[in-house]
């Protein structure tokens, strides 16, 4: 899974969001001033939709219905969990190789 796809699934795990809200969430989590281009986001959303990991969601009541909302699917949640486990195993390996300090 590409890092941007994992980031999107991580963002959507908290609930349906529109594209700009996804961008803001990912950039806030990155915390290093990194920016996500709109085109990159929508290409990744398209790939995730083709894989069945995200779907278009209804606009929440009281929100701007001109925005397209996206939601994670059960398959997307399973894929994100599998990727998180894979990453956790890599971190464990890095700790075993003394590249990172032991977990508290």
Image: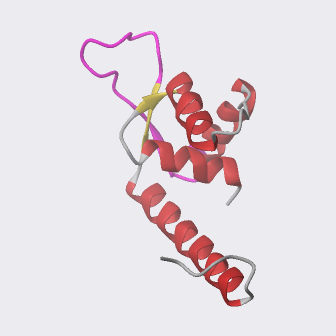
- Which image quarter: residue 27? top right
**Residue under the point 63% across and 49% down:** 5
Q: Nearer the viewer, residue 63 or 74?
A: 63
Q: Position of residue 103 (x, y in %)?
A: 53, 78
Quarter holding the N terminus? bottom right
Residue 1: say if magenta: no
Q: Which residues are magenta?
A: 49-68
- Left or right placement of residue 39 versus residue 80 in this view: right
Determine whether 2 is above or below 54 in the image.
below
Residue at the (24%, 17%) spot, across then down: 61
- What residue appears at the point 50 percent right and 50 percent down from the top-left corner? 10
Residue in the image at 67% along x and 47% along y: 4
User: In this figure, what is the number of numbered marks?
Assistant: 0
Residue at far bottom of view: 96
Above or below, 44 against 97 in this view is: above
On whether residue 60 falls in the magenta region, the answer is yes
Work out whether 15 lies above or below 61: below
């Amino acid at each position: 899974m590409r890092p941007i796809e994992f980031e999107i699934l991580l963002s959507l795990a908290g609930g349906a969001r529109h594209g700009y809200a996804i961008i803001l969430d990912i950039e806030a989590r990155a915390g290093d001033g990194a920016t996500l281009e709109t085109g990159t986001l929508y290409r990744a959303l398209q790939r995730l939709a083709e894989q069945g990991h995200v779907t278009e969601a209804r606009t929440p009541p009281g929100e701007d219905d001109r925005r397209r909302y996206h939601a994670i699917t059960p398959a997307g949640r399973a894929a994100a969990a599998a990727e998180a486990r894979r990453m956790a195993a890599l971190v464990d390996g890095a700790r075993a190789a003394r590249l990172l300090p032991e977990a508290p």
